[in-house]
Image (cartoon, helix red, strand yellow):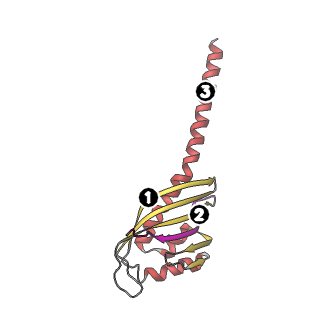
Amino acid sequence: MIHRTLVMAAMITSLLLVSKSALSQEAIPEEANRALALAFEKAWNRHDMEVGLRKLLTVDVDWVNVDGYRGTGIEPVVQGHVRVHATKFKDGVFTVNGVNVAVLNPQVAIVHVTWGMRGDRNDDGTSRQPREGLFTWVTVDDGKAWKIRASHNSNKSVVR
């Protein structure tokens, strides 16, 4: 009887550990993608596009900015950000306001990042009003880290 009780207790403990491990594995992609959004915020606010942004992107990244311009591949996307951070975003401050992660499978997620921006300028150099927007990212786990594979950015519409 004692032997059977010990065996049952061991089996229940094993099941609980497996369940707990499975739950933590499910949480890892969500946590990693939230960390990815915060790393993007830090790179943006340091204006570190060459290294900081680059390490967050896949080599075949597909990027659409708020103006509707599309860049494909890491070099055009990074260099485009380097250019605008030397001009209209050089004083810009980016804030992650929220992150929603939908894990499609263990290596792919769709991430919605709501953001705020202040201190940036229009193309003609005039100051912009603070604004908000939404990134939609497709992210992938490359085996070492979660990275942005595709991004679409939009300004939040003003309701009048």
Identify which amino acid the numbered label 2 is placed on. Answer: Val
Q: Nearer the viewer, mark 3 or mark 2?
A: 2
Secondary-structure class at tag 1:
strand
Type of amino acid at the residue the image marks with label 1: Gly
- Secondary structure under the numbered disc 3 in the rendered image: helix
Q: Does the magenta stretch include residue 42?
A: no
Residue farthest toward the top in the current orientation of the protein:
1
Secondary structure under tag 2 reads strand
In this orientation, which residue lies closer to the viewer: 157 or 131? 157
In magenta, the rendered stretch is 143-159
Q: Mark 3 highlights which residue? A: 12
Q: Between tags 1 and 3, which lies in front?
A: 1
**Considering only order in the chain, which callout, 2 or 1, is on the residue closer to the N terminus?**
1
Dot label at residue 138: 2
Q: Nearer the viewer, residue 61 or 131?
A: 131
The percent position of residue 67, horizontal first and vertical second, equals: 50, 78
Q: Disc 1, disc 2: CB below 8 Å?
A: no
**Dot 3 alpha-carbon crowd within 10 angstroms: few under 14, some 14 to 19, many 20 or more:** few
- Image coordinates of residue 155 in percent, x first then y, are 45, 71
Quadrant (top left, top right, bottom left, bottom right) of the C terminus: bottom left
Q: Mark 1 points at which residue?
A: 98
* Distance between mark 1 and mark 2 Cα atoms: 16 Å
For the residue marked with disc 3, what is the amino acid? Ile
**Upstream in sequence: badge 3 or badge 2:** 3
Q: Do the residues labelled 3 and 2 touch (CB within 8 Å)?
A: no
Q: Count numbered badges in the picture.
A: 3
42 sits to left or right of 141: left
- Residue at 48% from the left image edge and 62% from the top image edge: 113
Where residue 1 appears, as percent x and y from the top left, is 64, 11
Q: Residues within 10 Å of mark 1 (few under 14, many from 20)?
A: few
